[in-house]
Amino acid sequence: MTTLQLTAVGSEGFRVTPTLSDFNLRLVFTGSGDLNATGVLNDYLKLVHEEAIVLGLAQVSCDFTQLIFMNSSCFKSFVVWIDTVKNSDTRYQIAFRTNPNLPWQRRSLEALRRLAANLVTIETIA
Amino acid sequence: MTDSDDARALVSLTLSFQPLANQIGPLRALVSDLCKPHLADADGLSRLLLAAHELLENIVKYSTGGAAEFHLLLEAKSSGLRVRLRTKNRAAPERMADARWRLDALAAAGDPIAHYDELIRDSAGRRDVSGLGLARIPAESEMQLRYTTDQDWLILTAEGSANERMTG
């Protein structure tokens, strides 16, 4: 039986909540990813990668629809994570779900997609 | 009448403060509240707030002490809205050198998005600092970023345009 070891984490004004379904790990991000969130997010994405490898996941979905903002340090945490997956023997897809009312998301995530177009997909939720 | 002499200030904010991390969110919210009534679309506001946030974080992270300054000017011109953000803070010599290096490279780059992508690729293997905040401003906010220095003061100016909300 596949059991998720990851738990929800957060800092002031920021939270990530994981759920697992059919080899698809879904991470729901809420609040604002600013200076308070950087360390938490950096450590958490390392755990996400370890969990994805152990569980043999096909995809990790990042739901940004309730994420108000993400600073460049948090963005850098995603760069490192995606680069780690890119250079891993065991790869999985990374899908981002975005909110059309938060236009920064599309701009920021397009840069991540350009970093690894074969791994990263972006979906806008109407 | 030329575009330069028909400017009408819609928002003008000048702030001198001791920068702290927990002030960035409220200041960003203030900028949003002041500018949102004048902007035609969410994209213009989003770009402005991203630039304001990165500039404010920059002074929180790298000020060496004492007061820093934050200036916001939103002007209506015949060609549309002009936005100017300016920060001024004291910086340590090594930080000043790093900022100069990054900003000179940014100014020399023909395409800010290609330059940003290159920085992202270069930073991927580095676990220490982000180094992406300033380059993110022209790449994602479509604002021009320039700098000047005055002894140990670093002065950053971001300028861009947006569509004005039509009223009446």
Image: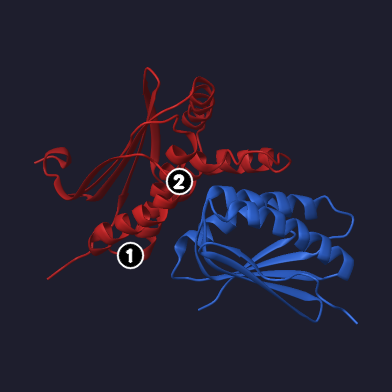
Of residue B13 and residue B18, the one placed in the foreground of this image is B18
Q: Residues within 10 Å of mark 2 (few under 14, many from 20)?
A: many
Residue drawn at x 28%, y 47% as measured from the top left:
B83
For the question of whether residue A113 can be seen, the reply is: no
Q: CA distance from mark 1 to mark 2?
A: 21 Å
Q: Residues within 10 Å of mark 1 (few under 14, many from 20)?
A: some
Helix, strand or loop at label 2? It is helix
Q: Callout 2: residue from which chain?
A: B
Left or right, B38 with reference to B26: left
Residue drawn at x 39%, y 44% as measured from the top left:
B143
Q: Is residue B95 above or below residue A100?
A: above
Color style of the picture: by chain
Left or right, B35 with reference to A84: left
Q: Is residue B70 above or below residue B100?
A: below
Residue drawn at x 49%, y 39% as measured from the top left:
B61
Residue carrying label 1: B41
Residue A32 location in percent, x, y? 50, 61
Left or right, B8 with reference to A24: left
The red one among the chains is: B
The blue one among the chains is: A
Helix, strand or loop at label 1? It is loop
Most extreme residue toward the left is B1
What amino acid type should be assigned to the residue bearing mark 1? Asp
Figure quadrant of residue B160: top left
The quarter of the image holding the N terminus of chain A is bottom right
Residue A93 location in percent, x, y? 76, 65
Residue carrying label 2: B54
Please tell me which of labels 1 and 2 falls first in the chain.
1
Of residue A79 and residue A32, the one placed in the foreground of this image is A32
